[in-house]
C-alpha cells in the first residue's frame, strides 16, 4: 500500500493508447498493489483527518487480509457523518484508491 496524500498525486500525462502515465503507473510497475492518490488540490487539515481515520480503520480490521477499499470507504463516510465541517465532497472526494 502506498498513500500519496499531497495535491494532484494521481495526475499525469495522457498518452493515446496508453492512458494516464504518471507516478501511479510507475508505482504499479514497481510492484505496489494498492495506491491512494489525489486528483486535485486538497485541504491540509481535512486530508490529515481523512488519513488518520483511514489508518485507524485499517488497524481495527480483524481480517487477516486488509480490505483497503472498505477501510477507505469507512473513513470517507466518517468524514461525512461525524464532522459537519468536512461533510462537503471537496474535503474527501479528491482521493481515489487504485487497486483493491
Image (spheres, rainbow, N blue to C red):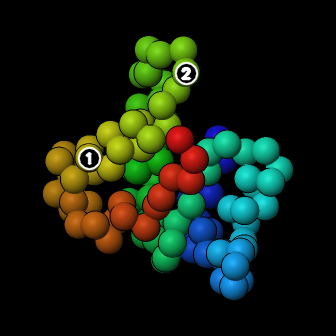
Classify mark 1: residues with Cα within 10 Å, few (<14), some (14-19) or many (20+). some
Residue at disc 1, secondary structure: helix
* 36 is higher (above) or lower (below) than 32: below
Left or right of 26 on screen, residue 38: left
Residue ID at (39%, 36%): 70
Residue 11: image x %, image y %? 61, 75
Instruction: Check the image and name the residue furthest to the right.
Output: 30
Q: In which quarter of the image is the N terminus?
A: top right
Residue ID at (62%, 45%): 34
Which of the marked residues, 2 or 1, is nearer the chain's N terminus? Answer: 2
Q: Which of 34 and 5 is in front in this view?
A: 34
Q: Nearer the viewer, mark 2 or mark 1?
A: 2
* 83 is higher (above) or lower (below) than 91: above
Residue at disc 2, secondary structure: loop
Task: Using the rendered view, name the quadrant where residue 94 is placed.
Answer: bottom left
Residue 20: image x %, image y %? 66, 75
Residue ID at (73%, 53%): 28
Residue 51: image x %, image y %? 47, 48
- Which numbered disc covers residue 50? none
* 37 is higher (above) or lower (below) than 33: below
- Which numbered disc covers residue 65? 2
The answer, for residue 79, to whether it is visible in the render is yes
The answer, for residue 3, to whether it is visible in the render is no
* 44 is higher (above) or lower (below) than 8: above
Residue ID at (26%, 46%): 77
Q: How many marks?
A: 2
Left or right of 62 on screen, residue 32: right
Q: Using the numbered discs, state the Cα–Cα distance from disc 2 to disc 1 in whole angstroms.
A: 21 Å
User: Which residue carries the number 1 mark?
Assistant: 77
Discs 2, 1 touching: Cβ within 8 Å: no
Task: Using the rendered view, name the quadrant where residue 60 is placed.
Answer: top left
Amino acid at each position: 500500500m502506498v498513500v500519496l496524500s499531497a495535491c494532484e498525486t494521481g495526475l499525469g500525462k495522457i498518452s493515446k493508447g496508453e492512458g494516464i502515465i504518471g507516478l501511479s503507473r510507475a508505482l504499479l510497475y514497481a510492484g505496489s498493489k494498492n495506491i491512494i492518490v489525489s486528483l486535485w488540490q486538497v485541504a491540509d487539515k481535512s486530508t490529515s483527518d481523512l488519513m488518520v481515520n483511514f489508518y485507524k480503520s485499517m488497524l481495527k480490521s480483524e481480517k487477516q487480509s486488509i480490505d483497503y477499499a472498505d477501510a477507505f470507504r469507512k473513513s470517507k463516510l466518517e468524514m461525512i457523518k461525524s464532522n459537519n465541517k468536512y461533510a462537503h465532497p471537496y474535503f474527501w472526494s479528491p482521493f481515489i484508491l487504485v487497486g483493491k
